[in-house]
C-alpha cells in the first residue's frame, strides 16, 4: 500500500512539473508571436501610409516626397526586426513580401496610379494573411485565451476594416489631389464607404474585453464610431456627390488617418489585454 501512495505522488509530481513546463513554453511562444504581430501591424500601417502618399505624388503633389522617403526608412527598420525572428523560416509569405516590396518601393511621379494602388494593396493583403498565420502558429486564439471569445476578429476583421479605410485614404487622396473623381474611383469609394459603415455597425460592436477594461474599451469604440461616421460623411459630401472636389488632399488624408488611428487604438488595447491574460 505504501509503494502505491509513493508512486501516486511521484506520478502527480511528474504531471505537475510537465504541465508547468508546457504552460511556460506556451507563454513564451505566445509572447514571441504577439511581438511579431505588433511589428507586422506597424508594417501594415506604414505600407498603407506609403500607398496614400505615393498616390498623392503620382497625381502631382511633390510635397509628399520627403515623407515617403522617411516612411521607407521606417519600413526598412521594421523589416530588419522581423528578419531577426524565425518568420522567414516558417512562412513563405514573408519572402514574397520582401521581394515584392523591393520592386514596389521605388515610386516616382511617373509611376502608374492604378497599378501603384493595386500593387500596394496586394502587398498589404499578404501581410494581413501573415498576421492570421502568426496568430494561429503562436496559439493566440480564442480557444487558448477564452476570456476574449472574439479574439479572431482582432487578427482578421478589425485589421481588414483598417485596410478598407486605408484604401479610401489612398483613393481619396489621389482624387483630392487632382480635384475630380472619375467613374472608377467613384465606384470604388462608394463600395468601400458602404463596407466601412456596415463594419462599424456589425463588427466593432461585437468585440469583447475583460471586465476591468470595459470603460476604456467602450471609450475607444465610441471614438472609432465617430471617426468612421465623419469619414463616411466626408466621402459622400466631398468626393462622391460633387463634380469638382474642393477638399485639400492633406485635409482628407488627415481625416482618414484619424480614423485609422482610432481603429489602431482598439487593436492596441486588445493586444494589451492579450498580454495581460497570457
Image (cartoon, helix red, strand yellow):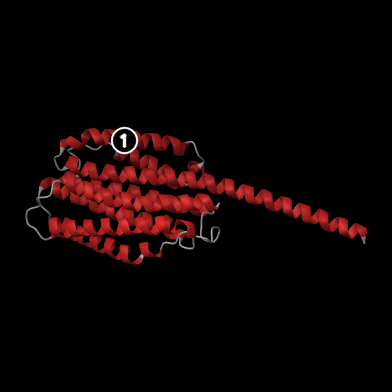
Residue 273 appears in view: yes
Image quarter for residue 160? bottom left
Residue 168 horizontal/vertical position (percent): 23, 53
Image quarter for residue 40? top left
Q: Which part of the image, by quadrant, shows the N terminus?
A: bottom right
The residue positioned farthest toward the right in the image shown: 1
The vertical placement of 258 against 63, above or below, is: below
Left or right, 131 with respect to 226, comes to: right
Residue 138 appears in view: no
Residue in view at x 39 percent, y 40 percent: 98
Neighbour class for label 1 at 10 Å: few (<14), some, many (≥20)? some
Left or right, 38 with respect to 244, comes to: right
- Residue linked to disc 1: 72
The residue positioned farthest toward the left in the image shown: 244
Total count of labels = 1
Residue in view at x 26 percent, y 55 percent: 227
The vertical placement of 60 against 262, above or below, is: above
Residue 122 horizontal/vertical position (percent): 32, 50
Foreground: 204 or 77?
204
Element assignment for label 1: helix
Residue 203 horizontal/vertical position (percent): 36, 64
Left or right, 123 with respect to 68, comes to: right
Amino acid at each position: 500500500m505504501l509503494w502505491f501512495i509513493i508512486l501516486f505522488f511521484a506520478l502527480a509530481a511528474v504531471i505537475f512539473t510537465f504541465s508547468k513546463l508546457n504552460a511556460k513554453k506556451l507563454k513564451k511562444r505566445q509572447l514571441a508571436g504577439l511581438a511579431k504581430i505588433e511589428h507586422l501591424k506597424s508594417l501594415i500601417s506604414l505600407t498603407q501610409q506609403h500607398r496614400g502618399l505615393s498616390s498623392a505624388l503620382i497625381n502631382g503633389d511633390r510635397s509628399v516626397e520627403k515623407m515617403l522617403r522617411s516612411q521607407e526608412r521606417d519600413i526598412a527598420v521594421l523589416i530588419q526586426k522581423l528578419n531577426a525572428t524565425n518568420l522567414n523560416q516558417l512562412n513563405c509569405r514573408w519572402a514574397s513580401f520582401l521581394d515584392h516590396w523591393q520592386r514596389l518601393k521605388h515610386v516616382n511621379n511617373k509611376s502608374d496610379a492604378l497599378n501603384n494602388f493595386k500593387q500596394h494593396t496586394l502587398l498589404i493583403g499578404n501581410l494581413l494573411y501573415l498576421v492570421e498565420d502568426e496568430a494561429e502558429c503562436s496559439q493566440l486564439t480564442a480557444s487558448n485565451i477564452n476570456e476574449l471569445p472574439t479574439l479572431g476578429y482582432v487578427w482578421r476583421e478589425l485589421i481588414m476594416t483598417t485596410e478598407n479605410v486605408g484604401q479610401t485614404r489612398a483613393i481619396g487622396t489621389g482624387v483630392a489631389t487632382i480635384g475630380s473623381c472619375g467613374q472608377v474611383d467613384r465606384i470604388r469609394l462608394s463600395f468601400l464607404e458602404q463596407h466601412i459603415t456596415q463594419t462599424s455597425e456589425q463588427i466593432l460592436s461585437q468585440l469583447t474585453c475583460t471586465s476591468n477594461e470595459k470603460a476604456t474599451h467602450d471609450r475607444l469604440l465610441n471614438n472609432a464610431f465617430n471617426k468612421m461616421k465623419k469619414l463616411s460623411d466626408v466621402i459622400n459630401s466631398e468626393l462622391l456627390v460633387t463634380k469638382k472636389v474642393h477638399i485639400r488632399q492633406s485635409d482628407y488624408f488627415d481625416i482618414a488617418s484619424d480614423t485609422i488611428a482610432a481603429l489602431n487604438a482598439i487593436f492596441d488595447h486588445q493586444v494589451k489585454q492579450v498580454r495581460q491574460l497570457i
